Image (cartoon, rainbow, N blue to C red):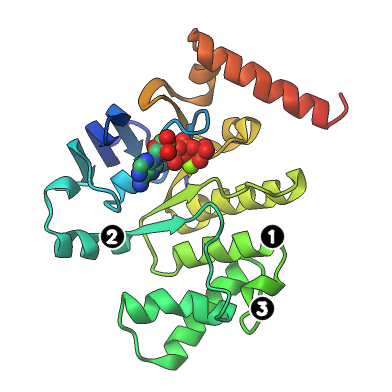
Amino acid sequence: MKPDLSCKPIIRTWKLHKAFGPHEVLKAVNLDIPETSIYVIIGQSGTGKSVLFKTIMGMIPPDGGKVWFRDTELSALSPDALMAIRKSFGYAFQNAALFDSMTVEENLAFPLKEVLRLKDREAIRQRVAELLAWIELPGIGSRRPDTLSGGMRKRVGVARALILRPQVVFFDEPTTGLDPVLSETIHKLVVRVRRELGITCVLITHDIPAAFRIADKIAFLDQGSIIAEGSPGEIARSDHALVQAFMRISFAGRTRERGL
Ligand SMILES: Nc1ncnc2c1ncn2[C@@H]1O[C@H](COP(=O)(O)OP(=O)(O)OP(=O)(O)O)[C@@H](O)[C@H]1O
Ligand SMILES: [Mg+2]
């Protein structure tokens, strides 16, 4: 499924602002995320990418500005209404954040029981099995997360982000700590989430070559402001010195890794 990049955005932020005490982390961030796109946010460490995700999802209240999900202004909702609409969002945490005291199946069933209040054990079991098959890890439901490899844990983290059939999934550095081959399997999974499930994918990554391969649009965040935004081609042609330097270093690193 190809996104219509000219259509109304599924997520929009307008002059989004967030400070922690005197530290201004987000400064008037304007974003338009097209429906069913893969939208990638890049930028240096500590520049506000994760805070941006959490502010869009309503996990952190903004100090100023607005966030829309389709026609609904999230920043104007009551906490209960916001909680209800958050079911439309999936979030794959940087470290997978699975409960090691539970099996994989229990981890995936948790949002179905706690958020959707599902009681039908067979329906829950089926949904979990279907999703484990979809991430190509059938039969691991009875394993505990701490017995899985890093790559498997990340896939289960993605499955948990999908369990409530969201319309948008936010991936916060889903490949951190993985080798290049495993990273590639996660990026392919992101592409399948969009193509096979029609879900909008918003991704933070430090893997710049991968961002250029899979993104429809890329936004470059620097010290809380978007300094470049556009298709991979447009970002590559950006004349912003920091964007150019960041890309030069990222692509040089990849060339060295391959021994070229
Ligand atoms: N709850 C909080 N209270 C105070 N400061 C915070 C809080 N959350 C984040 N910050 C600060 O906001 C800044 C941006 O953090 P953020 O986690 O968004 O960076 P990032 O761009 O995601 O970095 P990385 O690439 O390393 O994950 C950092 O200086 C961080 O210390
Ligand atoms: Mg982060």
Q: What's the residue at 30%, 29% (across, down)?
A: 24
Q: Which residue is mark 3?
A: 140
User: CB under 8 Å between callouts 3 and 2?
Assistant: no
Secondary structure category for the residue under label 2: helix
Percent coordinates x, y for residue 79 in the rendering: 16, 60
Question: Of discs 3 and 1, which sits in the foreground?
Answer: 1
Residue 140 lies left or right of residue 170; in this view the side is right
Amino acid type at image mark 1: Gly
Whether residue 129 appears in this view of the structure is no
Percent coordinates x, y for residue 15 in the rendering: 22, 29
Residue 21 lies left or right of residue 39; in this view the side is left
Crowd tier of the residue under label 2, counting other residues whose Cα lies within 10 Å: few below 14, some 14–19, many 20 or above: some
- Mark on residue 190? none
Q: Which residue is mark 2?
A: 86
Crowd tier of the residue under label 3, counting other residues whose Cα lies within 10 Å: few below 14, some 14–19, many 20 or above: some
Q: What's the residue at 37%, 82% (across, down)?
A: 113
Amino acid type at image mark 2: Arg
Q: Is residue 34 above or below residue 166?
A: above
> Marks 3 and 2, Cα distance to the nearest angstrom?
28 Å
Residue 165 lies left or right of residue 104; in this view the side is left
Q: Which residue is mark 1?
A: 150
